[in-house]
Image (cartoon, rainbow, N blue to C red):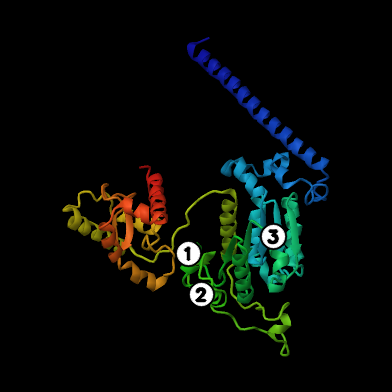
Amino acid sequence: MGERAKEWLLAAGAGVAVGALSTAAVMNLLSRSKRREGYVRELLESNGVTAGNARSSRQLGAIGSSDLLSDEVVSEQLTRNIQFFGMDSQKKVTESYVVVIGLGGVGSHAASMLLRSGVGRLLLVDFDQVSLSSLNRHAVATRDDVGTPKALCLKKHFSMIYPECQIDARVQLYDPSSEAEILSGQPDFVLDCIDNIDTKVALLAACVRRGLKVLSAMGAGARADPTRIRVADLRESSNDPLSRSVRYRLKKEHGIEGGIPIVFSLEKPKAKLLPFQASKEEETPSDYQIVPGFRVRIIPVLGTIPAIFGQVMASYVATQLAGLDFQTEPVVNLDLDHYRILHQRLIEHEELIYGTAKQVLVDAEEVMYIVKELWRGRSARDQNQKDTGRRMWRSANELMLVRWDKSKPAGVSNLILLKFSEADTHESTTLDHIKEKEPEFYSMVSRVLKRAEVEFAL
């Protein structure tokens, strides 16, 4: 046999060997997968759960919320969340109780993802029914659900997704008379997904009065740009008629000026409310209302936007429940030229005070981070976020960056934003004096600047 033939035989033999090993590995993997699948199937069947019987012994409360993650099926279903949060943080989510009020396009998606995130107990509240026109935005409803109360519709579908969750579905209108019933039990979070302003204001005021954490959804209808959706304090919203009205009513009727996180869009509404179109001459809008005073189908809605609102709400709440700290993007209405002006002011101030700008260690892009991310476009001495829109722009024109600690360079972790008069006062005092006379302010600034150190790995 020639040398070339021997080489071919050796190569073929090696290929067969590798192929056999690969086949064995694949078969072993498939076998493990099948064993795992069989185990889960047996476990489900042992608990009475089959394709035709999604709820039986794994019904509400079948497994205590504190023991949910010790259940093989539940831990496998939530494995990606556990990998993301860690077991201890996921346990906080699983042991939490969340109330979702308003189960339309926004609320159904928020509730659905909170369920899929492993929230152990949900109270779902809505007086309305699933309509054919709501299927363009509802999270789980089908044509078979049309005419079904939204709360019961969600409970039915949710029981097939995560039957261990304790779900209380109430076909009920939230109003002051039902406040005690709906908000009792110390929920860990309340989601306001109501689109009626009277009810929304009443709910938010009640949550503030009771000291409950609440996240409120503002106008999602008549909008199309998902990149403009934000989470911010109610005081920071702009271009949103609903949040403007809610803000006014809360301040006038309840003395509440802010402190409520909201999901809203910076986008101006793309369409106006449509007039009611009756199918018969004698019909009026009130003929279509389940509850007097509530709107009928007159808001044009691109279904994707309320869905994204709901997903944003669920993500915000899930991370809050898990204790995962993150900073929402500030709503700061400044353009790049303004950051360049602030950078130039810093250079001029350094030259005036220190005789040189050589210790300015930031550029315009880093100034943007300091102004927008750290100080949210406001003086370090005025972090109450009252100014929005044009008022905020005017106030920003009176701001400048100065060193916090005068013995250190003007770097990203040593610059604070102050008004001109505040900057003059700051330059004439010492950190020891501030620490002694204003300990809360000193601690707040130190905490903010520490964040810059961490994020810039300084």
**Which residue does the numbered mark 2 point to in the structure image?**
244
Give the alpha-carbon distance from disc 2 to disc 1, as whole Å: 17 Å
- Left or right relative to 100: residue 243: left
| Residue under the image location 28 percent in, 61 percent down | 425
Front residue of 447 and 47:
447
The image quarter in which residue 108 lies: bottom right
Establish if 1 lies above or below 164.
above
Instruction: Please name the amino acid that badge 1 sits on.
Output: Arg
The residue under label 1 is 228
Q: Mark 3 points at which residue?
A: 140
Q: Which residue lies furthest to the top in this view?
A: 1
Q: Name which quarter of the figure residue 202 lies in.
A: bottom right
Q: What element carries label 2?
A: helix
On the picture, is 295 further left or further right than 371? right
Screen quadrant of the C terminus: top left
Sequence order check: which comes first, mark 2 or mark 1? Answer: 1
The tag earlier along the polypeptide, 2 or 3, is 3
> Which structural element holds mark 1?
helix
Task: Residue 340: give x, y in percent of width and height.
Answer: 27, 60
Q: Which of marks 2 and 3 is in front?
A: 2
Q: Which of marks 1 and 3 is nearer the N terminus?
A: 3
At label 2, which amino acid type do we have? Arg
- How many residues crowd around disc 3 within 10 Å: few (fewer than 14), some, or many (20 or more)? some
Determine crowd level at label 1: few under 14, some 14-19, many 20+ residues with C-alpha closer than 10 A: few
Which of these two is toward me, 114 or 156? 114
Identified by mark 3, the residue type is Val
Q: How far apart are marks 2 and 3 (CA)?
A: 31 Å
